[in-house]
Image (cartoon, rainbow, N blue to C red):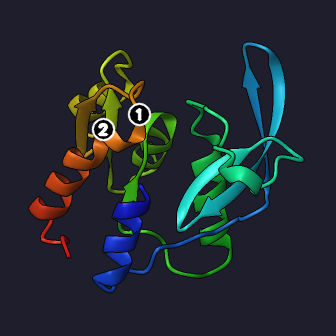
Amino acid sequence: YVALAEALSAAGCTVLTPAQGRSVDITTRFGLRTYNLDYVRGVALVREPGAGRAGGEPGAHTHSPLPVRTALAAAAEGGGPLPELVIGDHGWVCGAGQLGFEAIGPADTDDPALFVGEAEGSVSVAVPLDDAVRSEYYRPLTRYVLNRACLSR
């Protein structure tokens, strides 16, 4: 996601970061969990309260649409620009697409949500992949997407 955000920014697109630090309550199979919306190099994620950035801690894994809806609501309330494109996975893409935003994202091959969203017309593009592999294995796919979008450096 960082490579996509950086390429879009370098091409003159504004990468939005609304609602940074805002709390989001998400009901999980373990009960209600509170997360904080954060951004790293233009990429949104949620963190458990108290989780810092030290050591490059990853964000918490969630399929909930609530974080992206919180960010989009904050952007609308702030009177600033709204995104012309939302890139994400799981509930983030589906949540944005259901609100009428252009939304694309990688779709884990064992999670049908993005494929269903694409079939229903709320997700513009679902890119099938296995999200259980090391991040460096995505580099060829990232290069391909950037080349197809004429965003490669």
Between 125 and 144, which is closer to the camera in this rendering? 144
Q: Quadrant of residue 149?
A: bottom left
Badge 2 is on which residue? 137
Q: Is residue 37 left or right of residue 7?
A: right
Q: Quadrant of residue 1?
A: bottom left
Q: Is residue 120 left or right of residue 44?
A: left
Separation of residues labelled 1 and 2 (CA atoms): 6 Å
Residue located 33% across and 86% down the image:
12
Rate crowding at label 1 as few (under 14), some (14 to 19) or many (20 or more) other CA atoms within 10 Å. few
Between 135 and 89, which is closer to the camera in this rendering? 135
Q: Is residue 139 visible?
A: yes
Rate crowding at label 2 as few (under 14), some (14 to 19) or many (20 or more) other CA atoms within 10 Å. few
The reply to whether discs 1 and 2 touch (Cβ–Cβ < 8 Å) is: yes
Badge 1 is on which residue? 134
Residue located 32% across and 25% down the image:
130
Where's residue 141, x and y in %? 21, 45
Relative height, residue 61 to residue 143 (above, below): above
| Mark 1 secondary-structure assignment | loop
Relative height, residue 17 to residue 24 (above, below): below
Q: Is residue 146 left or right of residue 135?
A: left
Q: Disc 2 residue type?
A: Tyr
Q: Disc 1 residue type?
A: Arg
| Mark 2 secondary-structure assignment | helix
Where's residue 144, x and y in %? 14, 53
